Each structure stands twice: as C-alpha cells, then as structure tokens.
Image (spheres, rainbow, N blue to C red):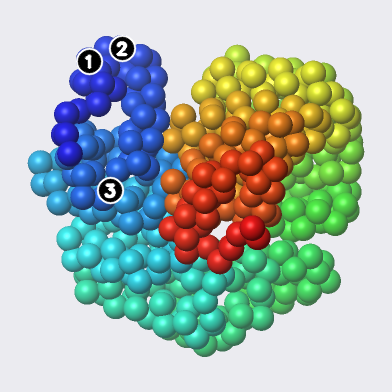
Amino acid sequence: MSRRAPAFLLRFPRLLSSSSTAAAAGAAASIDDLVKLINTQPIASLRHRVPPRFLASPLLDSLLLRLFAAHAASDKALHLFRLSLRRTEDPPPSASAFATALNIATRAHHFDAAFELTEDVARSHPALLTPKSLAVLLSRIAKFQSFDRTLDAFERVERAWVSAGLSFGVDEFNALLRAYCSRGRISESRAIFRMLHQRFSPNSRTLNTLLLGFKETWNLVALDTFYHEMILRGFEPDAVTYCIRMDAYCKRLQFLEALDLLDEMVKKNCSPTVETITTLIHGAGLAKNPDRARNLFDEMGERGLTPDRAAYNALMGAFVRAGDLKSALVIMDEMEEKAIGLDDFSYYTVFCGMKKHEDLEGFWKIYKRMVDKNFVPRVRTVMLLMKVFCGNGRADSGLELWDYLINKGCCPHRHALDLLVTGLCCRGKVAEAYRCFKQAVDRGRVPSERAFRVLEDFLVQAKQADMVEELGQMTKRLQIPFSSSY
C-alpha cells in the first residue's frame, strides 16, 4: 500500500503558518478530509496516514469530536487516542479528548475497551481522569447494563483512581447518581444514596442531583416534597436548586409559579445566573408568551448578566412557538452579527417552526445558509431535514444533504437512509439509492431491513441482478440477518 501523503495533508503545514482565521478554516477542512480517510482505511495504516500534528491537542480534540459525529468505528478512534498517549514529544491529550474517546467506545457498547483505556490512562496519564470522563462512562453503563453491573463498574473505576494516586470522593459519587437521576430513575438513585452516602459526604451538588432526578419524573408533588425535606435537614438552596425547580414548573406549564421562584431567590440573596433567566425564557416560550420572554432577555443586562448562545436559542424558540418566524430570524441574524454563532439547536428550532407553518421556501433558504457555513448538523436535525425533503417530493435535496454529510466524513443515521432510499426509488433514482446504501455499509453503518427490502424490490423490478447479488453480499459482510426474497 502506498504511503504517499494525501494532498490535503501536504497543505496543512502552510495553513499553520498563515493567519489564525485561515489556519482555523484550513484545519477544519483538513479534519473533514482526514475523517473521510480514516473511515476508508484499515487500522494498521492509520499510524502512517494520520499526521503527528493531529495527534496533539487541540487538533486531536476536534478530530475525535468529528469521528464521534461521523459514527466512525470505535476501534479506530481508540487506536488514534492510544497513539497520542505514546507520543512523548507532544503535550498529552486533553481530558476532554479522553472523555470523547470514552463516549465513542461506550456508544458502541464496547465497555471492556473503555475500561481498559481508563486503566491504561490511570497508569500513564492520571491527570486525564476527571468526574466528567467518569460520568460519560457510567451514564452509558447505567443505560444499557443492570444495576449490579453498574455498581461493579463504579468499584472498578474506583480501583483505577486509587491506583493512580487520585482521591475518589463526593464528585465521583455524584457522577454515579447523575447517571440515574438524569433519566428520572429515582428509585435506583435513592438506593445508591442509601448504600453509599456514609462513604461519601454529600454536598449541595449531591442533593441538587437527586432533585434533578425528581424533576425528570415530571412529578411536581414528589419534587416539592423532597425539596422541603432538604430544607428541614438544613440544606441551603443555591442558583442550581432554583433552576431545577423552575424548569420543572415551566415544563408543566406553570410559568407563573416559576416566576415566583425568581422573587424568592432575590429575597434570599441568591443571585440569578444566566442559566436561571434562560430557564425562565424557555418557560415563557412554552407558555407561548414571547413578549415576557423578550422582557426577561432584555433584563439580563440590568442584572449584570451577558446572554449566551443558550439564552438566544431560548428566546428564538419562544418566538417560533408563537408563530413569529420573522422575529426568530432576526434573532438568528443578531447571533451571527455578534459572533455568538449558531449551533444545532439554533437550526433545529428554526427548521421546526418553518416545517410547522409550511414555509418550505424559508426552510430551503435556512438549509442553504447552514451548508454555506459548512455547519454539520446532528442526528435529529438531519432526520428533520430528510423528512421534509423526501416528504415533499424533493428527494434530490435529500441526496444533496447525504452527499454533503458524506463529504464531511459523516455517515447519517440509518433512519435517514430509510427515508432517502424510499424517496429516491419512488422517483426512479434506484442507482443513486443503491450508492447511498453501499456508502452506509462501507462505513460500518447497519441499515434497517426496511431500506434493504425497498431497495431490493426496486432493483429486481429494474432487472439489476448483479446489484441484487451484491446487496446480499453486503448484508452478509455486516452479518445482517436479511435474506433475499428472490
């Protein structure tokens, strides 16, 4: 196999010596190309194909995040991270890069690999072990494994922390609680608290985490009861406590009660934060009161607070829910003018509003704007876009989106492939549908049986016997239990 460097890698050293803006843009483009290369190369060749500069922060952080978005094979991402650990001439990878590597491994249910990496890091780079990385590991284990297996995992990680000479205390205990509380699994959370609270002295974050668990159950009575129990035991509520309670009231459409909590905060000399006001702006949006949302947003300056992207998104969402798309677009423009930048939530919010109000022309304009910014949407936005395109006879636009994501090194979700294959086949573009199906399989994505059956039927009708045979071979390669009907 030739080891000649691809052209985009030869450009990279020149990009680093150019202006910071050009370097950032060039590095992003190089990462896109590198992800595509990684997706198509065997692990054995990665050491020679990936330039050393991409194995050091901050480029490694960006590369792993893009591999995560691209659903790249977890063994490749872990291999790259291990290569970075062995590079003594560069600074070690960051804690956030380690958390991303664990995220990639656990999403693929490769828990043993995640534990092995954690134990290796404990021996060589213990500074990378943080409550955040532990939370990533435990949240996935708690989601897919039994309660006892999760406790075993917690004990195994504790041994790794101790062997690295690190303290293992209440922050790590809180990470275990949050793994259950964030999903509203309050019975397991309380069981863990009863079992372990004597070993780890609970702090305000511990109690706020439990309060979060009650909030996620959508049971306001239980939440209020637990909160008052906390107060009777001497707990002093902080801004996080109030934010959790406000969010619970807002989601139950009790916006006025949430506003009362703001007054209570002020009386108790607990200063509201940006997150506090953002929660209330979101609540005003849920109550379809955009004027109150605007007032709360404008009052941030008077409180000495600077609105962040989440606050702008909440305000935009309030106008979208009220059907005022014009005001929502003004806010979107303001975010870009102030260099706050748009994220996936920003685009998704506006797309949802335009879909609801059947503004397909506006929908298309925002989509083009997103692509022109080289923004890579997340799964839910991709699904929304594909539904709108394929549901309105614009499968060609769905194909454009697919190719855009593939060129960015990403592989869309298999349900997006379902929609696209069906849309393309119904418009007579069977060859294009076959190409997309093959691209997904080549990247290790397991298609659904629905996509397989639709494509198989249309290929048989088109008398493409060779493609039908290759389709069967692809499913066998991925060990998919689909069999040809013909």
Q: Earlier in the sequence, mark 1 or mark 3?
A: 1
265 or 181, which is in the foreground?
181
Residue 2 visible? The answer is yes
Give the number of the mark in front: 2 or 3: 3
Please identify the quadrant where the N terminus is shown.
Answer: top left
**Which residue is the site of mark 2?**
19
Residue ID at (32%, 51%): 76
In the rendered image of this protein, does residue 299 appear above or below residue 114? above
Q: Is residue 51 left or right of residue 177?
A: left
Does dot 2 land on a helix, a strand or a loop?
A: loop
Q: Is residue 358 left or right of residue 27?
A: right
Residue 52 visible? The answer is no
In the rendered image of this protein, does residue 72 appear above or below residue 145? above
Crowd class of label 3 (few under 14; some 14 to 19; many from 20; radius 10 Å)? few
Residue type at the position of mark 1: Arg
> Residue 478: where, in percent of width, then height?
46, 59
Crowd class of label 1 (few under 14; some 14 to 19; many from 20; radius 10 Å)? few
- Label 2 vs label 3: CA separation? 34 Å
Contact, mark 2 vs mark 3 (Cβ under 8 Å): no
Residue type at the position of mark 2: Ser
Does dot 3 land on a helix, a strand or a loop?
A: loop
247 or 452, which is in the foreground?
452
Q: Earlier in the sequence, mark 2 or mark 3?
A: 2
Does dot 1 land on a helix, a strand or a loop?
A: helix
Residue ID at (66%, 46%): 460
- Farthest residue to the left: give it: 89
**Which residue is the site of mark 3?**
42
Q: Is residue 4 left or right of residue 275?
A: left
